[in-house]
Image: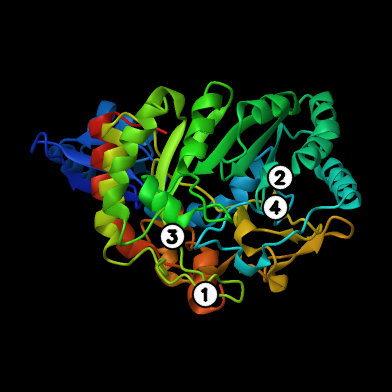
């Protein structure tokens, strides 16, 4: 690009600039649009403003999305990003709730009083298979079935019934097929995992809520027995068979105890090389009609204590060599056209946390998916001036609709993350640079 064109370039609207503690002569510049990070001398930033930046430096910043021809056009393009990503997307993700039965009695479970002996029937499973085959259009490259519960491994036969015919169908189209599990881990034995490998099982996400005394208080068996040791034994036995993601849910009262967990992970052979991803997240406050009555969750990510807890726990994970979630632009499944949830009764939703809330059912596997744009307020952030101008737009896109629903009783208004990101982004980026972390 000729120099005169570089001289008219502008710093991206979505660039955040921070001091670089290792060298005061540099600035850490991060793009909330592309996720790129660069160390830039202050004189280069001044040269951008004056239109005198040298072509070599400018070219590198353009490549990272930190330098753009027109900030106003960049903001307009951001408003169309969801539509563009859906146009380019060739994968389908389906969360399948095979049952609402569970062998645990977790204190904060969002499914709450819905839990019981409810299982997907064979007729519903057959119709689900037909529904997916019809929606999987030519040109699609991957189908992921994410089996959910209740506890999905209480329905092993049904998982095989659904995955069995879909795997050859998808692969005959030249596409990839995989299944994943969201499981409490109590039945994630090497035997069960091995039996699902031919069905396409690749990954499992398991919750471990800190060290034994914390985990067993929040996630006991229905009988009250502790579950911690069984889960970690299972994870250690199948860590070489599939990719494991371990998630822990913390509260204001217990997050400082979570680092004790790492010694137990090591004892069970769950070292960084054998755990694909490790992350900790706050327990969400559930206030709807299905609530268990637990009152220790978060109603917003902007609670002040989280600005200390989240960087603290993330740093504990990274300094021990585990991989964790990286802050980067991403979409909620509500915004993704070919991502949806099938409840055990065949009803369709756009968020797995909203199953059973009939006002958010958007069809079923017999009649198909109906237009859910108004139902889920898909464009709510586009109507908010603060969102349209926000530097964090592409990290947030209006925040979590489910959290807004639990807090406000509806999801018509955005769940703003700006205060939380203002408080934590710099620490998060410095952690990633310090530990050489990339997701």
Q: Is residue 394 above or below residue 262?
A: below
**Which image quadrant: the C terminus?**
top left
Instruction: Quickly name the residue at label 1.
Output: 287
Disc 3 from disc 4: Cα separation: 23 Å
Disc 4 from disc 1: Cα separation: 24 Å
Question: Tags 4 and 1 in contact by the CB under 8 Å rule?
Answer: no
Instruction: Quickly name the residue at label 2.
Output: 154
Does 77 sit left or right of 58 as displayed? Answer: right
Instruction: Bin the neighbour count of mark 4 within 10 Å (Cα to Cα): few under 14, some 14-19, many 20 and up.
Output: many
Instruction: Bin the neighbour count of mark 2 within 10 Å (Cα to Cα): few under 14, some 14-19, many 20 and up.
Output: some
Q: Earlier in the sequence, mark 4 or mark 1?
A: 1
Instruction: Quickly name the residue at label 4.
Output: 340
Instruction: Quickly name the residue at label 3.
Output: 283
Viewer-nearest of labels 2 and 3?
Answer: 2
Which of 273/214 is in front?
A: 214
Q: Is residue 380 above or below residue 366?
A: below
Which of 254/28 is in front?
A: 254
């Amino acid at each position: 690009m000729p120099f005169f064109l570089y001289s008219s370039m502008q710093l991206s609207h979505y660039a955040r600039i921070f001091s670089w503690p290792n060298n005061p002569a540099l600035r850490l510049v991060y793009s909330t649009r592309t996720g790129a990070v660069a160390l830039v001398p202050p004189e280069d930033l001044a040269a951008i403003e004056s239109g005198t930046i040298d072509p070599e430096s400018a070219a590198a910043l353009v490549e990272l999305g930190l330098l753009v021809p027109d900030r106003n056009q960049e903001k307009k393009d951001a408003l169309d990003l969801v539509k563009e990503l859906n146009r380019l997307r060739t994968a389908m993700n389906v969360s399948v709730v095979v049952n609402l039965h569970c062998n645990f009695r977790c204190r904060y479970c969002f499914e709450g009083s819905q839990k019981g002996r409810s299982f997907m029937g064979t007729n519903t499973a057959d119709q689900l298979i037909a529904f997916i085959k019809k929606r999987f259009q030519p040109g699609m490259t991957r189908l992921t079935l994410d089996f959910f519960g209740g506890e999905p491994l209480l329905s092993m036969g049904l998982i095989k019934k659904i995955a069995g015919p879909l795997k050859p169908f998808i692969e005959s189209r030249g596409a990839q097929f995989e299944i994943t599990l969201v499981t409490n881990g109590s039945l994630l034995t090497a035997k069960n995992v091995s039996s699902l490998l031919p069905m396409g099982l690749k990954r499992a996400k398991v919750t471990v809520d800190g060290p034994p005394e914390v985990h067993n208080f929040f996630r006991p068996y229905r009988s009250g027995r502790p579950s911690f040791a069984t889960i970690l034994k299972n994870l250690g036995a199948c860590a070489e068979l599939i990719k494991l993601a371990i998630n822990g849910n913390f509260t204001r009262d217990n997050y400082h105890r979570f680092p004790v967990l790492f010694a137990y992970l090591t004892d069970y052979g769950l070292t960084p090389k054998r755990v694909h991803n490790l992350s900790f997240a706050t327990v969400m406050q559930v206030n709807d009609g299905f609530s268990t009555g637990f009152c220790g969750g978060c109603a917003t990510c902007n609670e002040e204590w989280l600005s200390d807890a989240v960087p603290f726990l993330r740093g504990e994970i990274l300094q021990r060599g585990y991989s964790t979630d990286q802050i980067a632009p991403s979409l909620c499944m509500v915004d993704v056209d070919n991502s949806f949830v099938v409840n055990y009764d065949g009803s369709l939703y756009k968020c797995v946390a909203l199953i059973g809330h009939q006002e958010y059912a958007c069809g079923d596997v017999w009649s198909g998916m109906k237009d859910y744009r108004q139902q889920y307020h898909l464009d709510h952030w586009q109507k908010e001036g603060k969102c349209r101008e926000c530097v964090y737009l592409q990290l947030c896109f209006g925040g979590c609709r489910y959290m807004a629903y639990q807090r406000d009783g509806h999801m018509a208004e955005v769940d703003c993350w700006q205060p939380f990101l203002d408080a934590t982004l710099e620490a998060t980026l410095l952690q990633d640079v310090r530990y050489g972390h990339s997701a």
